[in-house]
Image: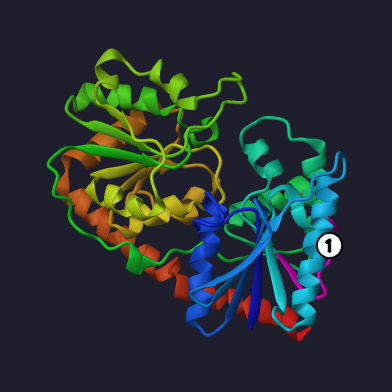
Amino acid sequence: MKICFLTPEYPHPKTGNSGGIGTSILNLSKGLDSLGNQVSIVVYGQDQDEVFQEDAITFYKVKNIKFKGLSLYLTQKKVEKLLNKLVEESKIELVEAPDWTGFTAFVQPKCPLIIRQNGSDTYFCHLDQRPVKWINKFLEKRALNKCNGIISVSEFTGNLTKELFDLKSNFTVIPNAIDVTQFEAIPSTSNTQTILYFGTLIRKKGLLELPFIFNEVIKINPNSKLILVGKDASDIATKSTSTWQLMRSLFDENAIKNVSYLGSVPYSEIKKIIQEATLCVFPTFAEALPVSWLEAMAVEKPIVASNIGWAKEVIDDGTNGFLVHPKNHKKFAQKISTLLNDKEIQSSFGKEARIKVISKFSIAIVAEKSIAFYKNYLQK
């Protein structure tokens, strides 16, 4: 099978930084390739047009066209032309794209087009309780209505997206995946009680709740440390250019002394940072199915995370992690303290977490489910 991923991001030195969409494509591509499929990746929004190959995957970098008022449409048509050329040359048989901002609304490849719902702008704006740009909602709805098939990374995301866009089409749930062999469980050599958050520093991921939570943790565990890893983002609500600066002012005097912000680090280094942590925290308000949770679970780290929507599809509360509403600062802190102070629960949750990831979110399992889904449309 010859599968092409169309994406605005991918984690590679030649294609720039990437978030969850790019990471999920990277992991799925590994799984598809290992099962004998041919994978191509088209990344738009690049600095130049370029083709290169690495590890059996062919990459097509696409530079956006700049033309006032028509840049998006002309870029869509440029991508469409490239995809159809690859179809005609028998290099691809099927295209998959994310729902984010509806880039495929005016892209019509001469092969089946699948949309994978990792969370549209409309979806995240709804969860974040802020207005969505009308053009983004229009493009996202059009893209979903005209594609051949829809995959959602979680039942929650699929159902909410269907409701927000009043979609008639059904969806199939196939979660995000990780390469569990790259996230081995190696016992920490540190005696420090370390709480780790990794991901973008942004309001929708609960980062403005985390200072209040850690203020409570410090009262119970005064020697505990909070480590933050990830890109600092601007804050739409306050117009601040730095969520980290907003956070700093919310920590108590005693708490801020035990907080370290490492900024962005290379993806290859994340694994070691997770391994050295005691536990991971994700007090987020808006996700679809976060890869970061799976990575922490694969390294056998217990998690305290948000109990909103998608969370129960990843974590079994009280078995491989704790789920708490991010606004309930004291309860969130109590669950963190329970894990910090009970090594038996730490170990039990961690082992159960890795078992869950291997059985449900490993790349081999997710790749096989994706192939079965693709075949339905290739046969048609």
Residue 316 place in picture, x, y as percent: 39, 54
Residue 178 place in picture, x, y as percent: 43, 63
- Side of 166 relative to 217 (left or right): right
Q: Nearer the viewer, residue 169 or 1?
A: 1
> What span is in magenta?
106-114
Number of on-image labels: 1
Residue 214 among magenta residues: no
On screen, residue 91 above or below 245: below
Query: Residue at 55% across / 23% down in the picture?
Result: 241
Amino acid type, label 1: Lys
Residue 36 place in picture, x, y as percent: 53, 85
Q: Nearer the viewer, residue 378 or 36?
A: 36
Residue 166 visible to the viewer = no
At mark 1, the secondary structure is: helix
User: Label 1 belongs to which residue?
Assistant: 146
Residue 292 visible to the viewer = yes
Tell me if mark 1 has few (under 14), some (14-19) or many (20+) residues whose alpha carbon lies within 10 angstroms of its own.
Answer: some
Q: Nearer the viewer, residue 132 or 10?
A: 10
